[in-house]
Amino acid sequence: MKRPIKAALVFGATSAIATAYCRILASRGAVLHLVGRDHDALQNLAGDLDLRGATKVSVAVADLCDTEQHKKLVTEGWESLGEPDLALLAHATLGSQSEGETDWKQQRTLIQTNLISPLSLLTLLANRFEQQHSGCLAAISSVAGDRGRPSNYIYGATKAGLSCYLGGLQHRLAATGVRVLDLRLGPVDTPMTAGLSKGLLWSTPERVAHAMDGKLARHHGTVYLPAYWRPIMGVVRVLPDILVQRLGI
């Protein structure tokens, strides 16, 4: 059954995909609470969403890697929205595979941003949603977490950990009325991926946001976006190791 999103708490709101999705919600008159680290970008986005029809937009500036702030940020979100229909985690960094292979500090930054920070927020958010017996808890993950590959296994490891955690939360909260979504994205043309060469399978933030919109209103569990990544990764997961090594995928 479809459950319209009328009030949303968005972490990493100024990321390209989150921005595109917030614009969809604003056009329907939703109430939004945006969290991000760039004050000016948040204010500009809030003004844009207000012009697009949002009923109310509030913002909170924070470095989401600072987990000590998370309890306060979640509390502020509930105070601003009442009982939100959705909490979306959209913050991440791609990092450098080549630099991370020889520099533990690079890996640690990636782990802190892509795994520790989301898990800290998910812990708090899951308990909040469980108490209200409703809502949708979603995080943007990646097909990179489906199998370790030489091109991006550090980034992929953080996303695999996030996906595993989301799967456990889904089963834990299944009987409470709370839906949990692992939004497993293929490569998307955003500022984060600006330095990478693009191919036919790449998507855009707007296309992903529209696909997310339908899923967040009614689904739970793992959702591949765009949908063609589900069969593709189904094949990639079962390829023999020797073939993966020869193909260099």
Image (cartoon, rainbow, N blue to C red):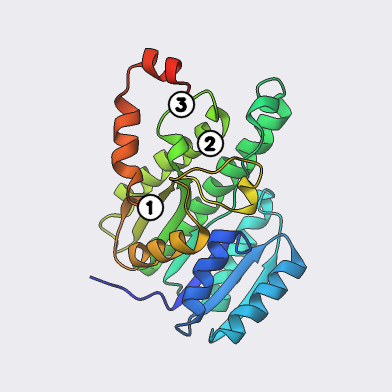
Q: Specify few, some or many for label 1: CA neighbours under 10 Å numbering under 14, 14-19, or 20 or more.
A: many
Q: Nearer the viewer, residue 224 or 140?
A: 224
Cα gap from disc 2 to disc 3, whole angstroms: 18 Å
Residue labelled with disc 1: 226
Which secondary structure, mark 3?
loop
Question: Label 3 near label 2: C-beta < 8 Å?
Answer: no
Q: Specify few, some or many for label 2: CA neighbours under 10 Å numbering under 14, 14-19, or 20 or more.
A: many
Q: Nearer the viewer, mark 2 or mark 1?
A: 1
Q: In the image, residue 93 lies at what x, y percent?
A: 63, 44
Quick check: 243 above or below 125?
A: above
Q: Is residue 231 left or right of residue 186?
A: left
Q: Earlier in the sequence, mark 2 or mark 3?
A: 2
Q: Is residue 155 left or right of residue 127?
A: right
Query: Which amino acid, mark 1?
Result: Pro
- Quick one: which residue is furthest to the top in this view? 242
Residue labelled with disc 2: 158
User: What residue is at 57 percent from the left and 77 percent from the top?
Assistant: 80
Which secondary structure, mark 1?
loop
Q: Earlier in the sequence, mark 1 or mark 3?
A: 1
Query: Which amino acid, mark 3?
Result: Ile
User: What residue is at 28 percent from the left and 40 percent from the top?
Assistant: 231
Q: Nearer the viewer, residue 193 or 103?
A: 193
Residue labelled with disc 3: 249
Q: Is residue 5 left or right of residue 111?
A: left
Q: In the image, residue 193 lies at what x, y percent?
A: 61, 46
Q: Nearer the viewer, mark 2 or mark 3?
A: 3
Quick check: 224 above or below 9?
A: above
User: What residue is at 40 percent from the left and 34 percent from the top?
Assistant: 146
Query: Which amino acid, mark 2?
Result: Thr
